[in-house]
Amino acid sequence: MARTTSNSKTKVAKSSSISKTKTKAGQTMTELQKDKSYVGRHVSKKFDSEMYNGTVAKFTPKHRLWKIKYEDGDAEEMDWDDLSKAMDLHDGKGQKKKGAKKEVTPARAPDATPVTATSAAAATVADAAKNYRVIRNTYPRNDVSCGDEHVVGEFATREQANEAARTEMSNTCQFEDWGEDEFANKPPPYSSADGPFEAIADEDEFVDIYVVDIAKEKVAEKREFEAAKASKPPAKITTVTAKLLDPSQRKFGKTNKEIFIDPNLFARHPCCIPGGVARNPSAYPNYHKGRGSFGFLIQRLSDRNYAMRALCLDGYGAEYNTYKKARANYISVVWYPPANLNDHASDKTIIDGCHLDMIDPIDGKTYLTGSNLQSAIVNSGTSPECIFLNGAQSNPGSVISADDIAFPISKCHDTLRCIALTECKINANLVAAIASCSKLRGLILENCQLWGDDENMPTDKHLAALLRSCPNLRWCFVKSSIFGAECWNALAENACPNLEVLWVDAPLHTQDRIDTIRGDHDTIRSALNSRWDKLKLCMINPDDKNKSRYVLGGAKKTDRLNGRERTEDEKHNLKERMPSIRRGSGSYLNTV
């Protein structure tokens, strides 16, 4: 999950050595500038006892990785530990000089503010009231909507904030050689896009630096939040809450319906689970980016959960559309439930933890815990039919465990009809708890962490037992390596005979092939083909265009269960990556 604030993307020159980095003499570089200054450095690395030399070609701030291009044409990415070793190896050929000290760049604290001249100035007023905030916004020159905002500091007076903004402008390379003259005696805002043509012609990023009146901002935010809570759903989002009586009206699969964003969805309907924090929707990352906003991501997950419920409990079909975000290398899916959170906010039979209120906008961690999940069930005063959870396990600080989820599910196993777990930890106990829900009709497991020791580590055998225990299952959406050969064996034996939606995304990558389907392919074909009259939506290991790698009744080219063979370049690059993969935790397949 994205962070609300991040380090700046202050640009440095494309140079061939550290001495050519675009920072002014006598100034202290920020952490980001220093990270970028390594671009152009020479490195060395041993592969199979043979030394290879290369150059640092690029730095990616988001993941703090440096791209290395080797003299033989190959490339890889390194973190700081690997990069520092590679630079040392090149400079000293692996021999530490007597008395020499290794340069150390400490790991970044996620919420730390880089020590700059500006932040030092901020420290002098640390005990004073913070009335003004200085913001630096870095964005691609062709897309101002994709800005990366960074809080430079907060200050007691407008004069202090203006001085901090001016210092920040002077230290930012996009303003170098012209900014101080252009903005002489002028208060902020400052924009590098206003620079002379010859100075900005080759810039691929612009920077805006401005001052925000915190008190006025808070008043505006409060007014905005109240308006969000009082808003109505977009006019074109029409919903139907009644059960579908005519089966002929059911529609499944890809549609070309328009994609609508409901930015105030969660503000109108607070989360039913205690412990969440209701915030202005604009507090979350990329609020103004529409389809690229964090709020729309959670809306898509929520709508998918309610689409499952509509099929399983009300008899509707399942339609979706797709789109690709700018600069993204994957397809995003949007579902069209006939009734969503707008219609079910007061439904006590739904425990819905897939909600913005449960996510911290700063670091993405979830407020969801075992105790507040149990409290929500008790407070509902009824037996829940649906549990929708987003465990946010990809972000540090998220604490809900697999057992925290297993316990309430086991207590409600007689009534649960739909379960959706996104980014949750799952172990064998949790899978067994779900398997005890004999009336289960819908299941979603997406991007969940397989968790547990020895016998409590979940496997495809545990998931296969679940499939055999839930004969009423109609919707099965699993995006996890846990869906393997044993699961296909269960389906081939006619487990879940009423299954209508089967979406499995569990590719297997080996040293020779990628995107192979896990399990015996003849068994998989048998399991799927025997359900041609039942399955209405079948998506197996979707490719980068969101096309299934197996199509029921399709031509020969629609059977891509065996994935594809790696190219020679891919095999060579993989061989180079293997030592670092082996050093990491888990097996190669788990890493990939």
Image (cartoon, rainbow, N blue to C red):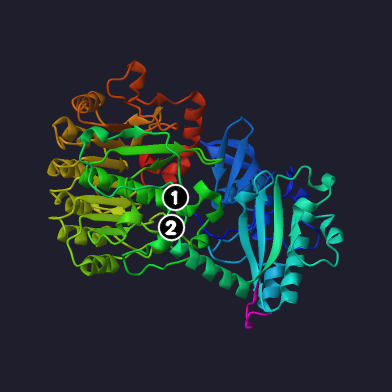
Q: Position of residue 285 (x, y in %)?
A: 52, 57
Q: Report which quarter residue 337 is drawn in.
A: top left
Q: What range is drawn magenta here?
A: 125-132
Is 390 left, or right, of 21 in this rendering?
A: left
Which residue matches tag 1? Answer: 235
In the rendered structure, which amino acid carries the disc numbered 1?
A: Ala
Is 532 left, or right, of 338 in this rendering?
A: left
Q: Report which quarter residue 307 is drawn in.
A: top left
Pick the front one: 576 or 260: 260
Residue drawn 30% across and 56% down? 344
Q: Say whether residue 127 is magenta.
A: yes
Residue drawn 69% across and 54% down? 10
Residue drawn 65% across and 41% down? 57
> Is residue 104 visible to us here?
no
**Answer yes or no: do the residues labelled 1 and 2 have beta carbons within 8 Å?**
yes
In the rendered structure, which amino acid carries the disc numbered 2?
A: Lys
481 in relation to 268, above or below: above
